[in-house]
């Protein structure tokens, strides 16, 4: 792969531009489904684009006494993490390439957007933002363990393969992991963890608008806020796609049928997340952590054991 | 019309400032977000933080406690930010006009020219508020005004 080709892959397809387009479409789907659930009409198709452009044109207010470096650095770090994961998943899925251990790198990179929220919240020197940041920290402690356990299931089942492309290859030969018992449990757990990872109800304590007025993002405005929104849009592509790739066979062999099926799987996952978010109230942070440590972690451990014995 | 103004017109995020209102206007504002009127059709969202806001919906009669805070909120908002005065109280203090605790009406508390649109009523109907937001957004486009005025004259 020469440099021009690599740039094209990273910036256009399946990298940044492709991710932004898919992410914006899917966040429109999310808002539209939400609106329909509430018997409303919902926003027009280009709404996420308008929101982003508008925020880019607004003034940025920096709170007095805030650390400028951390305040403006945090959104970029989060964006970088989301772009990194999305590109890795896309390259593995559409081009069949990758490097050894990229599953582990992806898991690390997926923490970056949450880390950015914590960093930005603390840097903005606002008590409500600090509350939001501390909630985000607790939430990470809660959901990271079951998420990693759920993602360990395909690795164990495939005999220790740690490469996205290799895992896809394995699923093409043996059927997707979601068809086995341990894989199915892992998929359900992964869906719950996505809910917390993308900070949507019932696990949006860090950005709770009615309690802490936007939480960690309370002081952000203009382009810096736009970066956070873009990160969220990209996470809407990256996280469900990552789970579909790891546990549900991804886009398979890239034949027309497999691609349609893959898109359907991704849509089912996203709509499921949206429906969970629309039919549940926000839980308190200690309840969220307790939920993840008991009702999610224990089945996750069971899934790992099941995978180890070959179910 | 630049991209900036166009995008702002398509996605006005509103922030609800209740400056000592009797709650009637507040409830009518929430009606705008509900299924019957659903202002998310036009891209409007109710936001929790003043920094995210593009339009302040101010209700209530500005008493001694709240007037200073309304001004602070306006200063904290990221510009460009529209201010829409909603209800008789926000317009001219309404029935609380001669009360001991009232200071000034909204447009004297905020810097001159800050209030973009006044929506009268006690409380105003949600349709009136939506018209108010639309008028406020149209004021962002200076070139559009004369054209419409001419058209209206022609119609007459």
Image (cartoon, coloured by chain):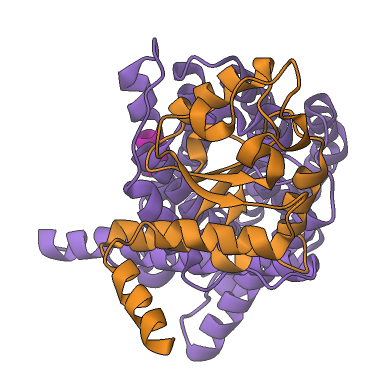
Chain colours: A purple, B orange
The front one of A18 and A251 is A18
Q: Quick check: is A155 in the magenta stretch?
A: no
Q: How many marks?
A: 0
| Percent of width and height locating residue A141 | 67, 26
**Whether residue A205 is situated above or below residue A187 in the rendered picture:** above
| Percent of width and height locating residue B139 | 39, 58
Q: Dividing the image into 4 quarters, which one contains the N terminus of chain B?
A: bottom left
Magenta portion: prevailing SS class: helix
Q: Is residue A150 visible?
A: no
| Percent of width and height locating residue A119 | 47, 23
Q: Is residue A227 visible?
A: yes
The front one of A177 and A131 is A131
- Left or right relative to B20: residue B156: left
Q: Residue furthest top?
A: A65
- The residue lying at 36 percent from left, 51 percent from top is A99
**Whether residue A231 is situated above or below residue A250 in the rendered picture:** above
- The residue lying at 62 percent from left, 62 percent from top is B130
Range shown magenta: A75-79
- The residue lying at 69 percent from left, 73 percent from top is A41
The front one of A181 and B74 is B74
């Amino acid at each position: 792969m020469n440099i021009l080709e690599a740039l094209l892959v990273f910036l256009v397809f399946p990298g940044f531009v492709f991710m932004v387009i898919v992410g914006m479409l899917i966040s429109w789907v999310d808002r539209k489904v939400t609106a329909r659930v509430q018997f409303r009409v919902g926003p027009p198709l280009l709404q996420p684009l308008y929101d982003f452009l508008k925020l880019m044109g607004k003034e940025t207010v920096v709170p007095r006494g805030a650390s400028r470096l951390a305040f403006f650095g945090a959104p970029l770090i989060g964006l970088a993490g989301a772009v990194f994961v999305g590109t890795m998943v896309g390259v593995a899925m559409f081009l069949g390439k990758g490097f050894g251990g990229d599953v582990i790198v992806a898991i690390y990179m997926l923490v970056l957007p949450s880390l950015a929220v914590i960093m930005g919240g603390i840097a903005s020197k606002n008590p409500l933002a600090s509350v939001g940041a501390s909630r985000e920290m607790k939430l990470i402690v809660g959901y990271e363990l079951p998420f990693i356990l759920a993602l360990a299931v395909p690795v164990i089942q495939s005999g220790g393969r740690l490469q996205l492309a290799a895992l896809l290859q394995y699923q093409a030969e043996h059927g997707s992991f979601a068809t086995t018992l341990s894989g199915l449990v892992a998929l359900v757990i992964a869906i719950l963890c996505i809910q917390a990872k993308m900070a949507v109800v019932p696990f949006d304590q860090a950005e709770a608008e009615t309690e802490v007025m936007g939480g960690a993002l309370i002081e952000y405005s203009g382009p810096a806020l736009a970066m956070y929104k873009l990160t969220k849009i990209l996470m809407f592509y990256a996280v469900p796609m990552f789970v579909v790739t790891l546990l549900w066979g991804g886009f398979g062999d890239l034949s027309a049928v497999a691609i349609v099926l893959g898109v359907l799987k991704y849509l089912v996952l996203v709509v499921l997340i949206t429906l969970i978010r629309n039919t549940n109230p926000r839980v308190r942070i200690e309840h969220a952590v307790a939920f993840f440590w008991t009702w999610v972690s224990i089945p996750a451990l069971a899934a790992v054991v099941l995978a180890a014995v070959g179910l | 019309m630049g991209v900036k103004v166009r995008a702002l017109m398509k996605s006005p995020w509103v922030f609800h400032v209740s400056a000592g209102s009797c709650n009637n206007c507040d409830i009518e504002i929430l009606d705008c977000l509900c299924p019957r009127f659903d202002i998310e059709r036009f891209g409007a969202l109710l936001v929790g933080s003043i920094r995210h806001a593009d339009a302040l919906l101010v209700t209530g009669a500005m008493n001694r406690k709240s007037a200073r805070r309304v001004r602070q909120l306006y200063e904290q908002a990221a510009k460009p930010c529209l201010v829409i005065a909603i209800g008789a109280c926000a317009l001219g203090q309404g029935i609380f006009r001669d009360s001991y605790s009232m200071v000034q009406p909204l447009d004297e508390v905020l810097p001159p020219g800050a209030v973009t649109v006044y929506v009268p009523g006690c409380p105003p109907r949600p349709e009136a508020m939506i018209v108010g937001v639309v008028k406020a957004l149209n004021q962002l486009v200076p070139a559009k005004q004369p054209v419409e005025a001419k058209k209206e004259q022609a119609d007459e």
